Image: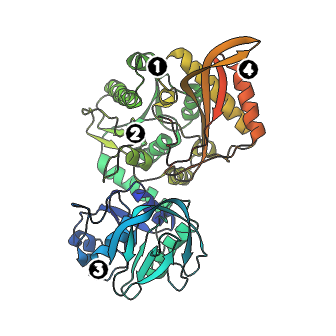
């Protein structure tokens, strides 16, 4: 590959791929390698810079992830973030110890603007997440940032081009965080900005074409942004050897199955709609545990695709629209904890009757997928479509699933979406939906006692879907939505609004 390249060494934190995504935002190509990658492998890539990520361990714990000190003698600029910062300090002769005050979340920070990292960065807010801290910088390093409870929040050895920061520049909560990374990439590493989404699309088309050869491909098409972009990308690589299967599992939003079919009937793709709602619901009957729901749906998805594949002859490859937040939350790769299994990642059964699964978006975040879709010529309507989880409403009905509950949720969710659209706020939250909780409470309607369900409304603002803030929807809009749901949807007598950010919550409830 002819691009300049930055190596991101993964030490197992939840935000690690997000660092790579921010680097790519700066038009610099990067590859994520495990911290166990040897010096020879790193040297062979000829990187212009190396970034150490965060991680869940303490650097002084037995068996903590580590790298060879030779990495600092390669003559390549290094930036350590959080755990990576503490590891640099330890390996280079500094001191790391448990912090007297744990820092988590938004924190005021002061920068030394004589540093190349912070030359044009005003003091402001950063995002901290640590229980350990650097208490003594290594010899030859200068402290270049501090918070009230963390006197050494960043250090540098500008002669050796070694830099470390305790906070997370990669999350949107750090003010000008991407700008700090850009300073490292351009002013310290000498990046030229030669990587683009157009180039990524062209390279993926060539890789898919080389992998598939003369084989046939089946695409798991949900009609959402991810699977639509994946289908279009693969279609450009293999043409009419791709068949797109849309499984209507009976867990879609109101009228969604017909809308998906209408959208894809006009596209140059082989499109097959499979009505499988009865089968899915029968397998889910009586199941209330969310992980079990996801596993059941994952297996039923694959079995359905296998049946359809047999109808069209031998199929060698299955395409899925898996994106990176699915992967990291499923605990696949690195040392990330399992937060929840996604039906097309951690929820896959052990046996899959395809030669290989192709996931061309696996290393991209949601906004990158949207940009790729635009680059591929997809309509704005399709590219900006509301995110919808593969398991569908199964994970928005808390507890066991019935047709009646699904109908309640479809109606409530449709009211929420239409009211937000009518208010002209469709671009204000990045995702919004209703949840049918398993909580029933006493109410009064028409002078009579009711004992009905509570509907929760959820709206979040985010760019990468790894972190998210709850959206401050206008009170009069929330009042209108609540009133309509109570008046128009049977068996609901209470509506609540979720004001929790991610973290600590996830965007979906299950």
Residue receiving disc 1: 277
Q: Does the residue at mark 4 contact the one at mark 2 (Cβ under 8 Å)?
A: no
Q: Does the residue at mark 4 contact the one at mark 1 (Cβ under 8 Å)?
A: no
Residue 247 location in percent, x, y? 45, 27
Q: Quadrant of the N terminus?
A: bottom left
Please say if 221 is above or below 327. Answer: above
Identify the element where label 1 is drawn. Answer: helix
Residue 504, which numbered label?
A: none
Identify the element where label 3 is drawn. Answer: loop
Residue receiving disc 3: 93
Left or right relative to 457: residue 328? left
Nearest to viewer (mark 4 / mark 1): 4
Nearest to the observer: residue 231 or residue 341: 341
How far apart marks 3 and 4 lie (CA) works out to 67 Å
Identify the residue at horizontal 48%, vertical 51% (top origin): 466
Residue 487, which numbered label?
A: 4
**Which label's residue is closer to the chain start, 3 or 4?**
3
Residue 85 location in percent, x, y? 38, 71
Please say if 8 is above or below 269. Answer: below
How far apart marks 4 and 2 lie (CA) works out to 35 Å
How far apart marks 4 and 1 lie (CA) works out to 28 Å
**Which label's residue is closer to the chain start, 4 or 2?**
2
Can see residue 245?
Answer: yes
Residue 162 location in percent, x, y? 38, 80
Residue 340, which numbered label?
A: 2
Can see residue 52?
Answer: no
**What colour scheme does the image use?**
rainbow
């Amino acid at each position: 590959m002819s691009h300049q390249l930055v190596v991101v060494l993964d030490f197992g934190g939840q935000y690690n791929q997000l660092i790579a995504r921010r680097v790519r935002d700066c038009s610099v190509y990067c590859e994520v390698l495990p911290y166990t990658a040897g010096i020879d492998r790193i040297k062979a890539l000829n990187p212009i810079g190396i970034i150490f990520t965060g991680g869940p361990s303490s650097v002084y714990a037995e068996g903590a992830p580590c790298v060879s000190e030779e990495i600092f003698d390669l003559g390549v600029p290094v930036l350590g973030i959080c755990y990576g910062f503490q590891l640099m300090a330890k390996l280079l002769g500094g001191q790391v110890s448990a912090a007297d005050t744990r820092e988590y979340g938004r924190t005021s920070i002061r920068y030394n603007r004589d540093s190349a990292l912070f030359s044009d960065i005003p003091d402001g807010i950063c995002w901290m997440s640590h229980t350990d801290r650097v208490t003594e910088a290594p010899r030859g390093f200068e402290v270049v940032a501090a918070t009230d409870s963390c006197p050494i929040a960043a250090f540098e050895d500008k002669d050796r081009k070694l830099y470390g920061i305790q906070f997370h520049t990669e999350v949107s909560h750090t003010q000008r965080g991407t700008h700090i990374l850009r300073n490292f990439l351009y002013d310290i590493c000498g990046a030229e900005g030669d990587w683009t989404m157009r180039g990524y699309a062209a390279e993926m088309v060539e890789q898919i074409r080389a992998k598939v050869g003369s084989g046939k491909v089946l695409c798991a098409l949900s009609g959402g942004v991810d699977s639509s972009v994946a289908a279009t990308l693969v279609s450009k690589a293999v043409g009419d050897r791709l068949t797109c299967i849309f499984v209507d599992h009976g867990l879609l939003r109101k009228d969604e199955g017909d809308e998906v079919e209408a959208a894809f009937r006009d596209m140059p793709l082989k499109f097959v709609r499979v009505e499988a709602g009865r089968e899915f619901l029968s397998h889910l009957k009586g199941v209330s545990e969310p992980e079990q729901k996801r596993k059941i749906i994952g297996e039923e998805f694959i079995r359905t695709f296998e049946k359809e594949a047999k109808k069209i002859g031998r199929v060698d490859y299955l395409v899925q629209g898996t994106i990176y937040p699915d992967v990291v939350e499923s605990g696949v790769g690195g040392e990330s904890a399992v937060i929840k299994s996604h039906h097309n990642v951690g929820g896959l059964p052990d046996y899959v009757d395809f030669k290989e699964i192709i996931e061309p978006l696996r290393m991209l975040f949601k906004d990158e997928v949207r940009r790729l879709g635009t680059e591929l010529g997809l309509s704005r309507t399709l590219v900006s479509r509301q995110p919808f989880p593969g398991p569908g409403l199964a994970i928005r009905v808390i507890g066991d699933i019935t047709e009646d509950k699904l109908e309640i949720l479809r109606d409530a969710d449709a009211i929420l979406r239409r009211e937000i659209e009518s208010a002209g706020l469709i671009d204000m939250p990045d995702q919004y939906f209703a949840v049918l909780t398993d909580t029933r409470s006493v109410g009064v309607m028409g002078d009579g006692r009711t004992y009905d369900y509570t509907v929760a409304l959820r709206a979040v603002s985010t760019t990468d879907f790894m972190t998210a803030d709850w959206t401050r929807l206008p009170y009069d809009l929330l009042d209108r939505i609540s009133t309509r749901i109570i008046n128009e949807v049977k068996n609901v007598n209470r509506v609540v609004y979720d004001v929790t950010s991610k973290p600590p919550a996830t965007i979906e409830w299950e």
